[in-house]
Image (spheres, coloured by chain):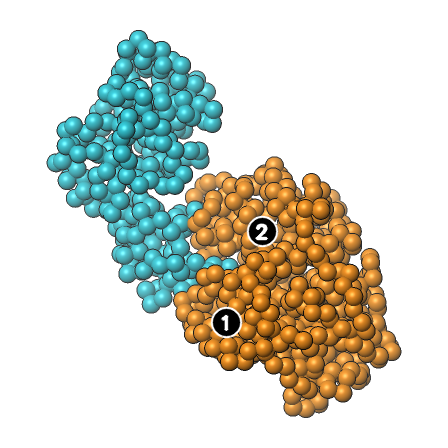
Chain colours: A cyan, B orange
Amino acid sequence: MVLAGGRSSRMGSPKSALEWYGSTLLRRTVSIVARAIAGPVVVVRAPGQELPDLPPDTEIRQDPYEGRGPLQGIAVGLAALAERADVAFICSTDLPFLHPAFIHAVLGAVGPDVDVALPVARGYPQPLAAAYRTSLAPLVESLLAADRLRPAFLFEKCRVVRLDDAALRTDPQVAALDPDLDSVVNVNEPGEYEVARARPEPAVTVECFGSAAGRRGSGPHAVRAATLARAAAAISLSLDRHVLAALNGEQITRDDHLPLTAGDTVAFISSDAGG
Amino acid sequence: MPGGYFGRALLVDVTGGRASSLALPEPVLRGYLGGAGLGTWLLHRLAPARVDPLAPEAPLAFVFSPLVGTPLTTSAKFAVVAKSPLTGMLNDALASSHFAISGKLTGHDAIVVRGRCARPSVLLVDGAGARLVDAADVWGLPAADAERELVARLGRGWRVAAIGPAGERGVRYATLSHDGRHAGRGGLGAVLGAKNVKAVAVHAATKVAPADPAAVLAAARDLRARSFGPATAKYRELGTLANLLTFNAINTLPTRNFTAATFAEAPRLAAEDLAEMRRVARNSCASCTIGCEHVYRAGGGKSARVEYENVFALGPLCGVSDPDAVLTASARCDELGIDTISAGGTVAWAMECAERGLLDAPWLRFGDGAALLRALDEIGRRDGLGALLAEGSRRAAAVVGRGSAGFALQVKGLELPGYEPRTLQAMALGLAVNARGADHNRSGAYEADLSGDLDRFAGGEAHVRATVETEDRAAVMDSLILCKFLRGVFTDPFAEWAGLLRTVTGWDVDATELQATARRIVLAKRMFNLREGWTPADDWLPARLLEEPLTLRSGRVASLSPATLRAMVDGYWAARGLDRDGRPTSECAVDLLLTEAVAT
């Protein structure tokens, strides 16, 4: 679940629409969450809020109230997911370095006796990069009804496991691919956005097979690319209808905007695979 | 008579050497086109119900098509259609090149062989009709050698389709070959061998004109130009073997009898390296501008035509990574005249049986190239373990028992091609429901899995739609006939195919009619199978694929549950207008034209 309804007052423009390597910050976050989980992805927006283009399977829910903080959005999202999932990863829009390995690790920490897995990363609790049992929905509603709008009030009333930096890094994938826990770095002001945007793109591996290999060879090619289109461009490959990509050997895609993260392997293949 | 047709089939009873002509009414030609479609209609009409596929009265049909003989690229193809001795159901297999053109220009849209010769013979068909000649001196030869010998003996212009030693000995997945191309699947070579016919030789004797020669020529020029584009580049540059590394990268390469979907040693067998180190030639079928045939140097000074399917089946599927062993095994299959996919699938099953102690064959182990070659030789001779393995994995598993059927990777008796169903779940459905059995040419549903348009790990309604659509497209391409390697150049396939058919035949056929034709052909195949004893349990996958999850390279687990497959099969049956037991209902609303009057 991605909460998109924040006011972005310090940023001065909607964070969901911030440009991110030819796409938007919200689209990146939604796609990263979709990569990490097996279930639906829900975006909760503010009343009347316009959203940028999102992947076609994204579900959009509207927060009935504006300005009541993240617990209101969490309530909407948990209600939307209660029938279909036991646990939801909930995050804000503005996490430009969110990594699927981090999401896996946080979700994996929700054991049978846990309601919330709350990262306490880089010195701060991260309620908007955390995992929640969907059965908490009634409790959240009751807190909202009592005007107790901060996530901390929820944590007082349920079973929370807190994951500090060391605990998060016990996950080998997190340790290898997100060692500085950049997943929780958020951007609230233009300056922070500029700094984030100036960072090197993630280091990924590109392989090419069949006709996609051509003169460039099959690789592997080590490149830096934030999206599928950037990876293709890095090896001077035209992403036309004759080329498809497989991310980490799994889903096949031709989504130019598909965000990449550190450690990804992209295989470009002929669209006429088989035969 | 419409352009492109003669309107008759030649029926040859090789028992007494008699031939007759079967008139093919225009509604039948228009309703089934040719190739696999027309062959299906002929089998309905000519095969006695529940006939033993290896009995004299079982027909074997060489079926041509309206586009054969035109300059349209890839149109020089023919279908061989019979009841399969491997599956007991309808089987059609395509082969290519000059036999298609000369066979049609004997003046027939099909040549049907029935009966059994008293001694090994060759059937000759030319302008003078049909006759038999003695085949004693070519009996026992590999198909290619027999073909070469017969062409030398018969003279210029004769084209020969022949079987190898495996066909003579009734190996249930024996092939029938012409010019190195094989009507490979389902044991058609055994059907011809059971008739004591080593080969069929044809010589062109007449001509047939298209309805609009100028329009056909223009269409041929256009198609030729498009055939040089990026949609066919893969076939030109590396051939289908380019799939090997691709499939390995995307967890789709069946390995060690489908216990894994990646093969660590796949790069040793990759087209990219073989092409650089071993390629000796690239060839085309007659009338083809793609040129997909890549010939590589094999062991012992031999060469082998290499496709993805034979390298997959004789390599990763058997755990063999030595390119010399795999290419030699491929060449050996050609010499013996056996289908590489069924051979590899059956040997892989036997390797697993041997490693589990279910077969007394301690020499047979995954990864052992010498053992693979020994097994193939024994199959070809039907001696030792080969007597069992020549029956195919389904029959062999029935003999061995002890749970071995669960890892005999076949559907309806036909061994699976190199597409992992747990990571290609539209293809899983296509393999389960196809009339021919586990087959990638009559069901190209993997196209949908690899399109990025659906989740290939989670079968559902979209996968059902894709399976129906790709099966329909294959039914038309296999009946026109056009090579499927050309499919990527068509952006509006049914409309474009209807356009080609209009110029050749003069019919006012359109895309809608061709889509109905596709449904008719698919349904007619199913109706034939029903007549021959198909049951709902035949539209299903082996237990391994439904009970054993696959761990992918990323650590993700891929599985295909029985409930998911059940829902997809039920959805497919409903989409085809079949009832809940997969049998036709009145809602099928397709006239199969099976009662069309014919004259002989």
The quarter of the image holding the C terminus of chain B is bottom right
- Check the image and report above or below for B469 versus A195: below
Identify the residue at horizontal 31%, vertical 56% (top origin): A232
- Give the label on residue B530, or none: none
A269 or B302, which is in the foreground? A269
> Residue B185 at what x, y percent from top left?
66, 63
Q: x, y (%) of residue A70? A: 28, 22
In this rendering, would B193 be left or right of A235?
right
Residue in the image at 81% along x and 78% along y: B19
Q: Which residue is mark 1?
A: B292
Would you say residue B153 is visible in this rendering?
yes
Secondary structure beneath label 1: loop
Q: Amino acid at mark 1?
A: Cys
Q: Which mark is on residue B468?
A: 2
A131 up-or-down from A34: above or below? above
Name the foreground residue: A114 vs B404: A114
Residue drawn where x is 21% and y is 33% of the image: A14
Marked residue chain, label 1: B
The three-letter code of the residue at mark 2 reads Val
**Parent chain of label 2:** B
Q: Earlier in the sequence, mark 1 or mark 2?
A: 1
Mark 2: secondary structure: helix
| Residue contact at pointers 1 and 2, CB within 8 angstroms | no
Quadrant for residue B135, please give it. bottom right
